[in-house]
Image (cartoon, helix red, strand yellow):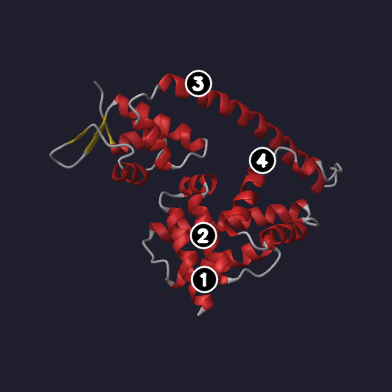
Amino acid sequence: MSTYTVKQMATLSGVSVRALHHYDALGLLKPSAVGGNGYRYYSRDDLLRLQQILFYRELETPLRDIQVALDDPDFDAAAALRAHRVRLTAEARRYDRLVRVIDQTIETLSGDETMDDKTMFLGFSPEKQAAHEAWLVETYGGDMPERIAQSKAGMKDWTARDGTAFQEESRAIEHDLARALTQGLPADSEVVRTIMQRHWNWVARAWNRKPDPAAFAGLGRLYLEVPEFTARYEAVSPGLTEYLAEAMRVFAARKDG
């Protein structure tokens, strides 16, 4: 039977060595054997388990839920793959619509075509947005519905260029924070505080108001509790969700002090 070192496993799958070590530490994907030299060795069964993990991750399933599913004695790999296929096919259709919207938006920005306001948002998931809003209202109550309405009002007049710049800044913040995590910088370091100031400003634009410290820290907790956010940040770098939430908590505490 073929075995693979952690580097070979990373090369085959495209998953970083660091992520494989993280999965091992979590008990999500432990190697079949560890040599006397401390090297990890993976089997073909481990490859298949990693494939399942990656399919679940593509579907934004939190790591803890993936582990519960895979460790269930009644887990049926073939049935899981069929379920993945159904969901991914639906997502493929949605992404195809998004690509068409991108193409139309590019043509609009270059002056070659005019796109109506409704077309600009085809392909985005209103169900996910509604679910996030419902979670916020249920968790925080109070004036949350009014705050959500205020946020939407602020975005109402955004151009396609505004939306693109907003998303690009989000990705840049995630990239820079992931690099700080990789470098082992503490959440209260000067570098991370600078990144959090950018994130604070980004949130202020999204909310159409300056966030108060408690709400900013609460947003970090939301990232930890809502699977879609956890999957997003963990896909950027393992451990990024907790690191981001802690950095937001520390930054908010300094703002409040």
Which one is earlier in the sequence, the residue at label 2 or at label 1? 2
Element at label 3: helix
Q: Residue at x 75, y 54 (%)?
A: 161
Q: Residue at x 40, y 32 (%)?
A: 69
Tell whether label 4 touches label 1 (CB within 8 Å): no
Tell whether label 1 touches label 2 (CB within 8 Å): yes
For discs 1 and 4, the disc positioned in front in the rendered view: 4
Report crowding for label 4: few under 14, some 14 to 19, many 20 or more residues within 10 A (C-alpha): few
- Name the spot of residue 88 as percent of width and height, x first: 57, 28
Asked if residue 123 is positioned above or below residue 93 in the image, the reply reads: below
Which one is earlier in the sequence, the residue at label 4 or at label 2? 4
- Name the spot of residue 2 as percent of width and height, x first: 26, 23
In the picture of the structure, the residue carrying the numbered disc 1 is 252
- Name the spot of residue 115 as percent of width and height, x first: 84, 42
Query: Does residue 57 appear anywhere in the picture?
Result: yes
Q: CA distance from mark 2 to mark 3?
A: 34 Å
Asked if residue 229 is positioned above or below residue 250 in the image, the reply reads: above
Q: CA distance from mark 4 to mark 2?
A: 22 Å
Asked if residue 84 is positioned above or below residue 123 in the image, the reply reads: above
Which one is earlier in the sequence, the residue at label 3 or at label 1? 3
In the picture of the structure, the residue carrying the numbered disc 2 is 220
Q: CA distance from mark 3 to mark 4?
A: 23 Å
In the picture of the structure, the residue carrying the numbered disc 4 is 127
Element at label 1: helix
Q: Amino acid at mark 2?
A: Gly
Residue 74, by quadrant, is top left
- Name the spot of residue 22 as percent of width and height, x first: 34, 46
Report crowding for label 1: few under 14, some 14 to 19, many 20 or more residues within 10 A (C-alpha): many
Report crowding for label 3: few under 14, some 14 to 19, many 20 or more residues within 10 A (C-alpha): few
Q: Residue furthest left?
A: 36
Label annotation for residue 82: 3
Query: Does residue 125 appear anywhere in the picture?
Result: no
